[in-house]
Image (tube, rainbow, N blue to C red):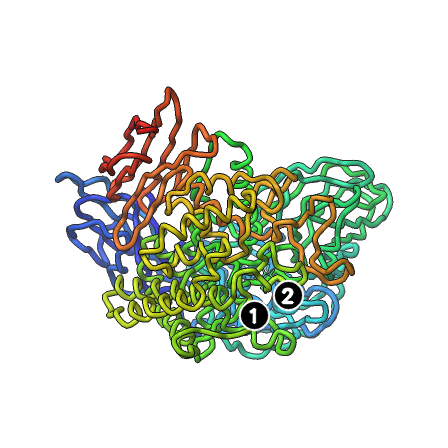
Amino acid sequence: MTLRNRAGRRLGITDPAPDLSWSDAGDAYQVQLSDSASFASFLADSGRVPGAPLWVPWPGPELTSRQRVHWRVRVETGGSWGDWQHDWVEAGLLSSSDWTAVLIASTSEKGAPRFARAVELPAAPVHARLHVTALGVHEVTLGGVPVSDEVLAPGWTAYESWLPVDTYDVTELLHEGVNELAAVVGNGWWRGRIVSQHRKEAYGPSRALLLQLEITCADGTTVVAATGDGAWTLTHLDLTDDLYDGTHERNRHERSGAQITHADSLHGELAARTGPPVRRTETLAARPLGEGLYDAGQNLVGWLRLHLRTSESCTVTVRHAEVLHEGTLATAPLRSAKATDTWELSAGEHVLEPRFTFHGFRYAHVDTSAEVLAVEAVVVGSDLPPAAEFACSDPRLEQLHSNTVWSMRGNFLSVPTDCPQRDERLGWTGDIAVFAPTAALLADTHAFLRDWLRSLRAEQRPDGQVPVVVPDVLPPGGFAGLVGFAGWSDAAVLVPWWVAQRSGDLGVLRESLDSMRGWVDWVHGQCENGLWLREKQLGDWLDPAAPPENPWMASTDSGFVANALFVHSTRLLAASLELLGEDASGYGALAEGTAARAWARWGHHAVTTQTGCALALRYGLVPDTERVSVGAQLARLVEENGGRIGTGFLGTPEVLFALSDAGHVDAAYQLLLCTECPSWLYAVEHGATTIWERWDALRPDGTLNLGTGGDGGGGMLSFNHYAYGAVCTWLHEVAAGLTVRTLPEPVIRVAPMPGGGLTHARSEQSTPRGAAEVAWEISDGCLHVECLVPRGFRAVLAPPNGPTIPLPVGRSHHVLDLWS
Ligand code: BGC
């Protein structure tokens, strides 16, 4: 049985009463809290509680700073208790008064500040905790050993509102006597280049460190080393670092003599993240292609690790790109991001990895006179637990699935971003809004997206408008007014809904409810005659029919799209209110009325586009009497378009569902399996290993679609944008046929829809109750279906033909007639 707490981690949590969850469902449960791992005495004991909730409120007194509490749970099934399962949580510093440390800063323009001091211990340490954050990104070492395997800590949040603090157990890294404590602070999101060519220092001009090391020694003494206590020295590494541009490290020399200043006091709260840290998650061997060029075999996010030998001092320069053009790195899509790492080396052997940066790339060019011994590609990202596997008889669909997983891995780096390579890498709300159901299926995103939602709520305007990027770093001026857009700002509703739906955690809806309502109410307030008629929208972004340089000029009217999203969000808000026991009738009526008015105004137009039909059907804008004809019309549009896709960001997640819901499974497979441009498999057949931003990122004639009308400047072209990967939800839920929902109650629906020549398919998904699985195969003219249903779910099997049947818990095998 797996145990989890709502703080997302064990050590250094700043939620003093984290809800608890465990995977086994029984008839009753019992939870106990204790100060000791042996449970010699209890802080709380729930006694026997009937039922099997997915989450229970923290059952005891709130944690105090630094307190460790052990918790254990057992589950009763069929009258007998299972074994106790144990876990623990330990609070970090919960109050600002716990911090004796103050921010210390470097105002030097050059180099990376390294703050250091000696920590002298009179006896061996028995307990040591290091609490740290930075304005910038930090690497902390004790005796030269990193205190954790995290990179780019503390990550990116709405810094003005909250700054993440990490707590590490460093007992093992300390010893009696003198220990060297050091922290290097890179520019990161705080001070580096962000958004565009000329924007630096988005958050502030200086890098700063806040660190408090608390040690208890074997002789009972306590030692505290805190920034600001006067014992620190400041030097600067000869290092230039930037997330977009890469790093330049010169001979690893340090310059000394800089002055420590005290940074401005913090505006935001100090709090632990719930999400997983960013770390190295995988290493791939890079294949030499000749003349210094290397191929990682996979478009990825991270950097190269180089093993080199040189007999004299020399330089190494590594440049990166996602694709090759005529045999060389195609760097135009990076726009102004230099994505170049440089080292100045002395003679000897070196293992090099860049610091305080990351690159989106598959290919790299290494320029050096040193002997290259080995080249590896290090994959970096927020270390999310994977939650789904997909397999089927068509390897192209497996590749499509893999491409989506890789795009998610690359773009889930501290915040969910649009792309990881060009001078952008921002938390575009629309991208995660459309991808949220898929993201929450492919990985355990609960803790990660709760962090991001916290930032979203902090940056939502008081009137309810939601910025189009979170963290909101768009400078005033050119981007002014980019708040409150259909599809983008709807992230305020769609993201919490899907995180709650997957995790069963109503708390996600509870903490976002005001934000969800704020957005829906704001749109409502904008309506004229019951419809939202804002002229400027981002619309069905990157509809393949839109001019490459004007991706918002989609073929589906942006007014219709905006009102469809408004209806959808209003319905999800109403459902959320109901789940939380609040009156939702007003929002239900608002959704119905808007749907009817939008259909009356745009229905005749909506039926002329794939996105129009798909949103109308999926978001319930079509009157019941017209559903059959609109479904048939969508299938006709697909047929007329030769199976090619006609949707942009907002229509894509819904179009296959709209077809299969309406019974047009063949048309859905036709769209899914099309290989002509534009289509999902066009990219796959052209060697994509991630999801492209544009359907025709690489045009059939071999040119790159930079979207600039050919002038070569600016442009918008990423080979790693997850939005169109939203199709993977359909692969799992319809092609393989496994749909898992936890709200209002845990249900599983097994409804495979074979088609497109597939002979077998399989989906495995993590649920809060453990794994669920469907695997089907066609043999002897029959559909053989294997199901795995975890205890705690009500499950049904809906065969392609014939009535629905209940499914038992555990594994079961069914032979269905395909053709009757
Ligand atoms: C991003 C998109 C984003 C869009 C909206 C682009 O630059 O890469 O994914 O949603 O802008 O304007």
Name the residue that disc number 1 marks. Answer: 227
Answer with mark 1 or mark 2, whichever residue precedes in sequence. Answer: 2
* Horizontal and vertical percent position of residue 701: 73, 44
Name the residue that disc number 2 marks. Answer: 115
Q: Total number of numbered labels?
A: 2
Q: Rounded to the nearest whole Å, what is the CA distance between mark 1 and mark 2?
A: 9 Å
Q: Nearer the viewer, residue 56 or 744?
A: 744
Q: Nearer the viewer, residue 44 or 765?
A: 765
Residue 600: which quarter of the image? bottom left
Q: Nearer the viewer, residue 611 or 118?
A: 611
Verify CB contact (< 8 Å) between mark 1 and mark 2. yes
Vertical arrangement, residue 177 with respect to residue 75, above or below: below
* Horizontal and vertical percent position of residue 40: 23, 51
Q: Is mark 2 within 8 Å of ligand 1?
A: no
The disc labelled 1 sits on which kind of residue? Thr
Locate ligand 1 by image quadrant: bottom right
